[in-house]
Image (tube, rainbow, N blue to C red):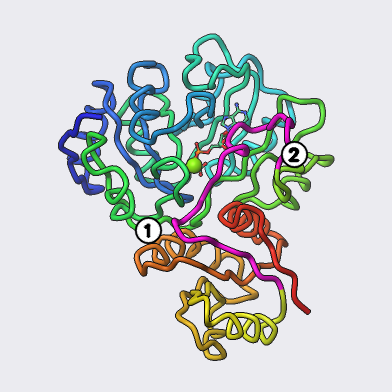
Amino acid sequence: MAQIKTQLLTASDKDICTAGELLQRGEVVAIPTETVYGLAADAFDPQAVIKIFEAKGRPADNPLIVHIAAIEDWEPLVTAIPPKARALADAFWPQALTIILPASERVPQVVTGGLSTVAVRFPAHPVAQAVIRAAKCPLAAPSANRSGSPSPTTAQRVAEDMDGRIAAIVDGGASDVGVESTVIDMSTDVPRLLRPGGITPAQLQSVIGDMVIDPAVTAALQEGQVAASPGMKYKHYAPRAKVVLVEGSPAAFAAFVNAQQHLHPTALCFDGEQTALSVPYITYGKRDDPAAQAHKLFDALRQLDDSGAQLVYAACPSADGVGLAVYNRLLRAAGFEVIHLD
Ligand code: TXA
Ligand code: MG
């Protein structure tokens, strides 16, 4: 694609106004959110949305999330809002939760990837909200990485992937949560969790009761199986290095990794557990702190690439609470390759 000049904008009122004008003109602008950075365009402008797919190299059948800055802006996007979906929005918006419902006719096909449903999110980040208001339209926005790479959690990481490909990047500091939003499908009889994220299954169940966790959250799709969420069929969150997830106690992990020194691996380990390792390492939060792991994971994966690592042994996180999101992303980064020790 042709190179364009990418403006670096701050979160000042003047720069947010500039971002709004660019979006109104049909340009793509990267914006901070509390989960990860997004690559935004006017959700009602198919030509603008196509530019997102081009900038990311994203397959056209992988739908985008539409971002709003007021709950009432949800109504024109969907055919109806059932009581349980409304209850979720009331309980958790604005936060790291994306809700899927049948799409209204106003939502262009290019946004939904041809599906009959649309995913909507009301982000909590004040700069994301300010840009949506300045653009005066809902914004379609996937994570701001090149397709397949770890999602960016800082403006610098967005620039590495997107400089020369989009009109502007708004710098709103490091994303707080660090992994993408929880995605729940409320268009089916029983609600279905398609992607774990900052809002945990227990939090969702406390509001809506029964819920199914889609099998693709923790297992590879089988040959011929249709993905409930198209994004689940693509390789994801992957650094260039080969990643293998290693499950076991701190001592077992260290013994395993140290015994593989001849393969020159790099360890992705928990804070404090590097002292037992005799190979290079990057840490991603304490073993018992899933929120810190989520916050650090994607940047750690990108640091592994910066370091030139070819083979990474990643210490396996617990899949409880927010940990389910961390585990899900690492499983995909590892192409579902897990070694169980102990
Ligand atoms: O936190 C987030 O959700 C970030 C920030 C920027 O808001 N966005 C994000 O978007 O992660 P993206 O496009 O990278 O991931 C959206 C996921 C994809 O796996 C996509 O397939 C799925 O949501 N999705 C979107 N619309 C869907 C729909 N109508 N039905 C099923 N899955 C859908
Ligand atoms: Mg993504």
Q: Quadrant of residue 318?
A: bottom right
Residue 223 among those drawn in magenta: yes
Residue 170 among those drawn in magenta: no
The yes-or-no answer for disc 1 within 8 Å of ligand 1 is: no
Q: Is residue 162 left or right of residue 206?
A: left
Which is nearer the eye, 257 or 121?
257
**Coordinates of residue 146 in the picture (x, y in percent):** 39, 42
**Which residue was labeled with disc 1?**
174
- Give the amino acid type for the residue marked by disc 1 in the picture: Ala
Q: Residue at coordinates 48% horizontally, 29% vertically from top-left? A: 59
**Coordinates of residue 165 in the picture (x, y in percent):** 25, 36
Residue 340 vertical position relative to residue 84 in the rendered view, above or below = below
Badge 1 local density, few (<14 within 10 Å), some, or many (20+)? some
Q: Earlier in the sequence, mark 1 or mark 2?
A: 1
**Coordinates of residue 232 in the picture (x, y in percent):** 62, 39
Secondary element at tag 2: loop
Q: Gap between marks 1 and 2, in whole Å?
A: 36 Å
In the picture, which quadrant includes the N terminus?
top left
Q: Residue at coordinates 37% horizontally, 37% vertically from top-left? A: 39
**Which residue was labeled with disc 2?**
222
Number of on-image labels: 2
What range is drawn magenta here? 221-247
Q: Quadrant of residue 221?
A: top right
In the picture, which quadrant includes the C terminus?
bottom right
